[in-house]
Amino acid sequence: MNTQIDRELPLPLYYQLKQIIIDSINEGLYKEDEMIPTEYELMEKYQLSRTTVRQAINDLVTEKYLYRKKGIGTFATSPRGVELINQGLYKVDSMIKKAGFKNSVKFLGVHEGKATAEVSAMLEVPLETPVYFMSRIRYADDTAISSSRSYIRKDMIHDFLEEAAEAALAFHKYLDKKGFPVEIIVETLEPCVLDSKTAKLLSLPPKKLAMIVKDIGYLKDHTPVEYSVSICDTTLLKYTLTAKREPTNPLSFKRRSE
């Protein structure tokens, strides 16, 4: 297990700190519901700026490795907490089928480029790392429902240019076949207003309200493999999540009143 920041490595310092904390959780050094060191303690221990430490902590909270208690500190979750993020994923293809429509994908193209600041952060690679950009549209029957772009590191799959059209049909199954099985998915949903280009692709009026779905796919060892951004028309689709809640014990209210 790596416990040191190596400034000679071509990896962002915040990413190295993230990996140290993840390894510490996996090795049991930070147990479930145990408070991790404070930002100041991490700054002192690893000689990092507060901005770097905060970025690492914020990412790990978003990815469900950590959680915060206001005014107290930041705590480790368990592997179970990470697995829970697979429940309730937006999964446009599944929603299309549940709505009674036929799901299909149109491959728009693939090209090589360099990781932008956003892609660099999501794939946890240095800025301008060579990556592939794959674009596609998903349909419900004959209606365009979503426009998506997926990013994958060029050094992971060298022949992606030739195989992208195949990958577009079932991206995660393709990654399974190539030896990069995605086992953890972190998903973020954000409202948006359609820009003119996306509106034209989806045959919708510009400035229509839509939903951005961002997915990061990780291997079992928490290595990010792919980052996808989909802009979805929610006219035909509804997002429903069923969750179980543990009711409060009525006796606790009785004790308070006494």
Image (spheres, rainbow, N blue to C red):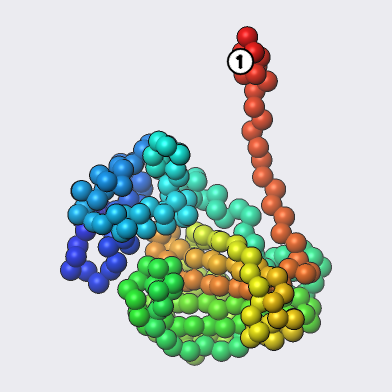
Q: Position of residue 113 (x, y in %)?
A: 42, 86
Q: Position of residue 200 (x, y in %)?
A: 69, 86
Q: What residue lies at 55% left-to-right and 49% top-to-bottom?
A: 84
Q: Nearer the viewer, residue 127 or 207?
A: 207
The image quadrant that residue 122 belongs to is bottom left
At which x and y percent is residue 46?
A: 21, 53
Q: Is residue 129 visible?
A: yes
The residue indicated by pointer 1 is 256
Amino acid type shown at disc 1 = Arg
User: Mark 1 Cα within 10 Å, few/some/many (few <14, many 20+)?
Assistant: few
Q: Is residue 225 left or right of residue 126?
A: right
Q: Is residue 154 left or right of residue 50?
A: right
Secondary structure under badge 1?
helix
The picture places residue 133, in percent across and down from the top left corner, at: 49, 83
Residue placed most toward the observer, 81 or 179: 81
Q: Say above or below: 17 vs 35.
A: below
Q: Nearer the viewer, residue 10 or 170?
A: 10
Q: Residue at x 74, y 81 (%)?
A: 205
Give residue 112's quadrant in the image.
bottom left
Q: Is residue 76 above or below residue 126?
A: above
Q: Which picture quadrant has residue 223? A: bottom left
In the rendered image, which quarter contains the C terminus?
Answer: top right
Residue drawn at (60%, 62%) of the image: 189
181 relative to 144, above or below: above
